[in-house]
Image: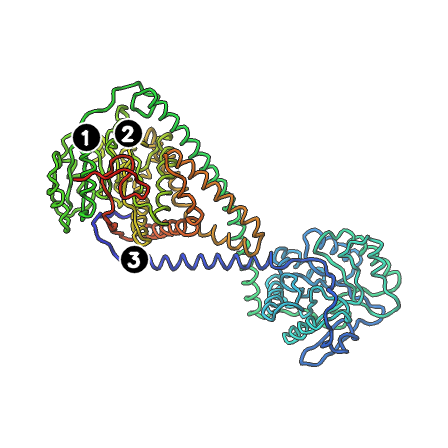
């Protein structure tokens, strides 16, 4: 990834990023098409029994059809029918090919040196192309039985066309030959043709098809027993017949046994058993044209590709579900362990968080607090006053990074003791922080954003883990102050869950990837060891934290050190903020990828922390739109009750995790009522942010710093809650 400069200006989305978004849109649309195709092929229709629904009108069916032969030619508007010659039996099979029964039936036909007509279902043919080719290679002929075994008599015109042409394309794509015979699913004898079926027969006749009905139904689809099937197949007299049997649609063991016996009896009685085309003297299959072959091949491979995509997505969803469940168990388990350790430490009165380190005196040395500020006049007074009111001795350095709104003047006008203002040209946040470090008087340094306020005991609580000499940096607990409204509540939930579950896990696993800019404490010698704050990425806090871990320092989380910050109040502002955060995190991950193969503390960051970020903050969000599209697919084509139950189960897990995080942080559970709505709006927004960030990173686009709008809603807290918080009960501290 390219080196970025943290200048405080913004640019429009570059053309190359728009191009990548276009590609992403095309991919999502292609995925949607694949799902629609699979839903149609596998779930809108299915192969059932061939019983004919009764009660339908036949008033429009010509007498020549209802009283004619089983092979109907309605091409050109005229109606002609034909029957097999006397003592000739046209043997037909519907609903295949089936991987179990079709080969057995072909073996029986070969044994008796008999050919037949197989009316294949297009979807089954695509699933088993080898069987289709074997049918033809054995001298049998193929006929169209629609794409998904749909009742053409009740289907609209567009679906009739799709069903017939789709099945024909499948046959052509597999065999290179086109079929001219068609049998409508659920059809029977001529006198059973209804108005709807006749309309479909006329429509397919215009496309050049002959419709093949039946005169003798074996009723093997009922599975009445081998003897019953044999009786049903027995012709009376010498008149030619079209026999209906099935090689697909269910267990056809009775069909196979009855066929073997019946063919022996037919031969003994002098009947000639053959295919429909041979029986009526027509060539029912022809070589397909080049264009037809190209179209058929593309159709078959398109269906196969969509099937592969859906299968891959299904397995990926299963893996994602398992990984998500594992994450839930991990974060809750580690958070509980972290909480127990913290409580034992507090009970021991040591002021430390870890119990595996000998007890030491509480940290009381003074601290330098650095506040980088660029056009922070709206909230800088509240921030500085809150820090100045700390119960711990502090030196405050406000670094005005070229502000144009009088930020430095606001701080100077406060006249607070121990507050120093540094004015410099605009150079970016890392530059401002480094300037503050140079001017700092103390070894312990706290960095805080200009839109953040502290509680009186925040600084003291934050630095206590420094009793452990291995600790080089400490993350505090950032909380949303302006949590009113739906967007504020969603961000409040996100912060509480992130800081009280994920951050506790990182602490216990010793792989903390980020000390947030809103509140973090550092040893100056640790910062000096990594060269200060780098401007290589847009997430200077993440970059710095990872650098410290790679330098051998431990980074921990202090839950009692609370900082209150302004969260974005509009979706546009939220997008810009998270886009910068996510893109900067990707930069930092790439920059520190070498930690994956290092040992010690660096290796823990790499193999634990970076892997966690990669899976849960990059890969799963990238996959999230697919999950949502698949959920819609499931609601339409699968069992909506089951899909709804799965979604509710997922939501329940999220609610339980959030509730546990809220209890750990002593927060009221009331905002959790917005969690279901968060899944529909906020979650998708965050996923899109990750997608755009990844697209931008892959494109190698130079992304600049986006500054968040300040609202000036924060006030100095008297303890526990900021006055801007609607739930606050503490009076604000005046000047």
Query: Crowdedness of circle 1 by 10 Å Cα count: few (<14), some, many (20+)?
Result: many
Can you give x and y, in whole percent of width and height, for residue 65 in the image?
75, 75
The first of marks 1 and 2 along the sequence is 1
Q: Can I make out residue 272 in this image?
A: yes
Q: Check disc 1 and report the residue beneath it.
A: 367
Label 3 – label 2 distance at C-alpha: 38 Å
For the residues carrying marks 1 and 3, which lies nearer the camera in this image? 1
Q: Check disc 2 and report the residue beneath it.
A: 553
Residue 560 higher or lower than 238, as above or below: above
In the displayed structure image, the side of residue 662 where residue 636 appears, left or right: right
Q: Check disc 3 and report the residue beneath it.
A: 13
Can you give x and y, in whole percent of width and height, for residue 295 in the image?
55, 66
Residue drawn at (57%, 56%), measured in percent from left and top?
A: 637
Front-most of residues 79 and 464? 464
The first of marks 3 and 2 along the sequence is 3
Can you give x and y, in whole percent of width and height, for residue 101 in the image?
72, 53
Front-most of residues 90 and 349? 349
> Mark 1 and 3 residues: CB-CB less than 8 Å, in contact?
no
Label 1 – label 2 distance at C-alpha: 19 Å
Residue drawn at (35%, 49%), measured in percent from left and top?
A: 485
The quadrant holding residue 435 is top left
Question: Circle 2 sits in a helix, a strand or a loop, which is it?
Answer: loop
The quadrant holding residue 230 is bottom right
Residue 268 higher or lower than 153, as above or below: above
> Mark 1 and 2 residues: CB-CB less than 8 Å, in contact?
no
Query: Crowdedness of circle 2 by 10 Å Cα count: few (<14), some, many (20+)?
Result: many
Residue 652 higher or lower than 97, as above or below: above
> Mark 3 and 2 residues: CB-CB less than 8 Å, in contact?
no
Residue drawn at (35%, 26%), measured in percent from left and top?
A: 342
Query: Crowdedness of circle 3 by 10 Å Cα count: few (<14), some, many (20+)?
Result: few
Question: Circle 3 sits in a helix, a strand or a loop, which is it?
Answer: loop
Question: Circle 1 sits in a helix, a strand or a loop, which is it?
Answer: strand
């Amino acid at each position: 990834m390219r080196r970025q400069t943290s200048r405080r200006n913004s640019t429009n989305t570059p053309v190359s990023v728009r191009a990548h978004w276009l590609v992403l849109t095309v991919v999502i649309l292609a995925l949607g098409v694949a799902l629609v195709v699979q839903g149609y092929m596998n779930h809108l229709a299915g192969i059932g029994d061939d019983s004919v629904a009764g009660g339908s009108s036949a008033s429009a069916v010509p007498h020549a059809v209802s009283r004619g032969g089983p092979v109907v030619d309605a091409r050109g508007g005229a109606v002609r029918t034909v029957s097999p010659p006397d003592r000739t039996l046209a043997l037909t099979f519907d609903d295949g090919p089936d991987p179990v029964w079709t080969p057995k039936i072909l073996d029986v036909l070969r044994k008796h040196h008999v050919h037949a007509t197989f009316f294949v279902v297009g979807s089954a043919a695509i699933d088993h192309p080898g069987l289709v080719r074997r049918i033809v290679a054995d001298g049998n002929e193929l006929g169209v039985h629609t794409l998904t075994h749909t009742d053409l008599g009740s289907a609209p015109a567009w679906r009739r066309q799709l069903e017939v042409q789709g099945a024909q394309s499948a046959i052509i794509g597999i065999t290179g030959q086109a079929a001219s015979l068609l049998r409508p699913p659920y059809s029977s004898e001529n006198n059973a043709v209804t108005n709807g079926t006749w309309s479909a027969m006329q429509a397919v006749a215009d496309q050049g098809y002959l419709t093949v009905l039946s005169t003798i139904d074996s009723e093997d689809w009922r599975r009445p027993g081998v003897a019953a099937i044999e009786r049903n197949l027995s012709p009376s007299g010498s008149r030619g017949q079209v026999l209906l049997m099935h090689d697909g649609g269910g267990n056809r063991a009775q069909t196979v046994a009855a066929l073997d016996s019946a063919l022996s009896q037919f031969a003994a009685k002098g009947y000639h058993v053959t295919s429909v085309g041979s029986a009526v003297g027509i060539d029912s299959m022809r070589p397909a044209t080049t264009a037809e072959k190209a179209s058929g091949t593309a159709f078959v491979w398109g269906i196969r590709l969509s099937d592969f995509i859906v299968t891959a997505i299904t397995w990926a969803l299963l893996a994602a579900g398992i990984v998500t469940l594992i994450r839930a168990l991990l974060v809750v388990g580690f958070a509980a362990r972290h909480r127990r350790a913290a409580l034992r430490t507090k009970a021991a009165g040591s002021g430390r968080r870890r119990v595996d380190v000998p007890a030491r005196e509480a940290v009381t040395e003074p601290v330098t607090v650095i506040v980088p500020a660029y056009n922070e006049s709206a909230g800088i007074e509240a921030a500085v006053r809150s820090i100045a009111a700390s119960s711990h001795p502090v030196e405050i350095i406000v670094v005005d990074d070229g502000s144009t709104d009088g930020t430095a003047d606001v701080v100077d006008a406060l006249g607070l003791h121990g507050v120093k203002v540094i004015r410099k040209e605009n150079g970016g946040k890392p530059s401002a922080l480094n300037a503050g470090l140079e001017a700092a008087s103390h070894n312990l340094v706290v960095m805080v954003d200009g839109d953040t306020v502290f509680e009186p005991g925040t600084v003291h609580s934050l630095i206590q883990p420094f009793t452990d000499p291995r600790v080089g940096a400490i993350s505090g607990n950032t909380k949303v102050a302006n949590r009113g409204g739906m967007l504020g509540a969603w961000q409040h939930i996100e912060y509480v869950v992130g800081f009280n579950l994920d951050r506790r896990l990182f602490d216990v696993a010793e792989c903390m990837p980020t000390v947030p800019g809103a509140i973090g404490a550092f040893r100056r010698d640790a910062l000096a060891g990594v060269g200060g704050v780098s401007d290589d990425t847009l997430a200077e806090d993440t970059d710095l934290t990872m650098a410290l871990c790679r330098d051998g320092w431990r980074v921990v989380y202090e839950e009692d050190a609370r900082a209150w910050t302004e969260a974005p109040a509009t979706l546009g502002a939220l997008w810009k903020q998270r886009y910068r955060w996510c893109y900067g995190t990707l930069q930092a991950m790439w920059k520190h990828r070498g930690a994956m193969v290092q040992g010690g503390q660096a290796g823990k960051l790499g193999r634990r922390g970076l892997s966690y970020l990669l899976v849960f903050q990059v890969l799963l969000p990238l996959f999230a739109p697919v999950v949502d599209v698949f959920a819609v697919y499931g609601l339409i084509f699968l069992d909506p009750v089951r899909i709804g139950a799965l979604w509710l189960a997922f939501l329940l897990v999220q609610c339980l995790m959030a509730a546990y995080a809220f209890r750990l942080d002593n927060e009221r559970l009331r905002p959790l009522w917005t969690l279901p709505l968060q899944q529909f709006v906020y979650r998708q927004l965050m996923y899109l942010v990750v997608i755009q960030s990844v697209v931008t990173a892959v494109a190698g686009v130079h992304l600049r710093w986006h500054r968040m709008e300040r609202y000036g809603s924060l006030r100095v807290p008297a303890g526990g809650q900021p006055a801007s918080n609607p739930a606050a009960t503490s009076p604000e501290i005046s000047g």
